Image: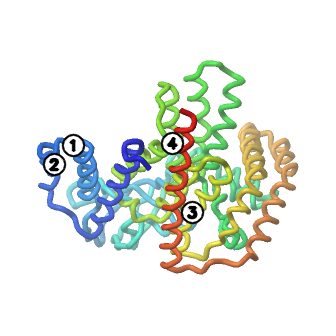
Amino acid sequence: MGFKNYLSFFYFGSAVLGAIVGTYVKFPLLFIFLPIFVLVLTKKPRLSLFIALFIISNLSIVSEVKMKNVQFVGTIKNVQADSSIASLRFYDGIRWRRLWFDVKLYKKEKVGTIVYFIGELIKTNSYPKYYAKTTFYATATNYTPTSLIYESFESFRSFIAKVDPFYQNLFGNQTRDENFVKSGLYHIFCVSGMHVSLLYLFSYYLASLITYQKIIKIILSLIFPTIFVIGSGMNLPSQRALWMLMLSSIFNIFDYKVRPINTVSLVGLFLVLVNPEIVLSLSFYMTFFSTIGVLSATNNFFANIGGFLGSAPYVSLISSTNVFSIIATILVSVPVQIIMFCLSIAYVLYVMKLHILSMFLLYSILPFAQFVKLIANTFSKFPLIPQHIIVSIAFSITFIIYLAIMQEYQSKKLMHNS
């Protein structure tokens, strides 16, 4: 990748490295002036900015904290399979103060729920960096638009599970299914770029029927993807996809051309600066680098390879890897798109209290759901590459080679066209 063409990518990498280093060594506060000295001495603003982002993310990472028998209060901002992530305040004996980092609760709550507990924070080696060990715990419903949207999705997921539990997994439930895990197709359950992009296209088509105004059309198209991300639990991959979609829409409104890899890098840079602890999350790397792998591709086939290679180094650290999932993903791509479009329509009908029509639509797409499950069952029986650090390194090298080949191909293509 040419340095000048992908500056945002390198700035993103600088912030990530700064935060990673900060988990082990935090620089003195005086280091904040280092970029200024570099700029004065070298007259290179890009190098200075690179160092500045490194230092800022390093200094922003949470320091060692010791809190025992402390009162906490806050709201649930993110829901995972078996836990929740909360944004909290704590009582220091005089007043309530904001806690400037996320805390994991090993309780699955609804997005927007108010939590109050007494306990201590225990350090971990992943994101969030601390989890709460409670001695007293209480919750209250928070009647905000966010919590009401999540409640609506929870109700709809229970409704569609009566037809086929597979549906609720595609609509944000993310229940573990061994066939999908072993086949390498579990990623279709994770609300990310695919889901959000499909819903944006669906919304854009509907908005096109209403108006020809570009700005209004784009704004309307963002509403349902935003609702879907909230209703699905605001996980990190879906937030990345939504922020990227919003940023791309802004560029589109102003007719500003930005390379897609720079767009996703800008989103990653923003998320790291706002919440540097996310560099401890494997899903953070999986979603960003698989997206970069897809965006660097020259066609749909290579996009599937790029998406696989971008996530494989991290998947192979925690489980076995199915390389045949590239083929499986291609086979289920269209059926999953059809199911997602129909689930979206079924949700709208459900909200409108047209439950019979919604149920009819759900039953009509059962053949597509059965086909996807058949593919997952078939590919789950294929041989797997075992989990190992050497495998992860090998996949990392392969991904770098893939990016280099894609970049070289695109460079030759541009030279040929010019």
Rounded to the nearest whole Å, what is the CA distance between mark 4 and mark 3? 18 Å
> In terms of sequence position, does the residue under pointer 4 or pointer 3 come before the other?
4
94 to the left or right of 173: left
Rounded to the nearest whole Å, what is the CA distance between mark 2 and mark 3? 36 Å
Q: Residue at x 37, y 57 (%)?
A: 73
Rounded to the nearest whole Å, what is the CA distance between mark 3 and mark 1? 34 Å
Verify CB contact (< 8 Å) between mark 3 and mark 1.
Answer: no
Q: Residue at x 28, y 62 (%)?
A: 62
Q: Is residue 60 visible in the rendered structure shown here? A: yes
- Residue at the spot of label 1: 44
Q: Amino acid at mark 3?
A: Leu
Between circles 4 and 1, the one closer to the viewer is 1
- Residue at the spot of label 3: 309
Verify CB contact (< 8 Å) between mark 1 and mark 2.
Answer: yes
Verify CB contact (< 8 Å) between mark 2 and mark 3.
Answer: no
- Residue at the spot of label 4: 260
- Residue at the spot of label 2: 38
- Residue 354 location (% of width, % of height): 80, 39
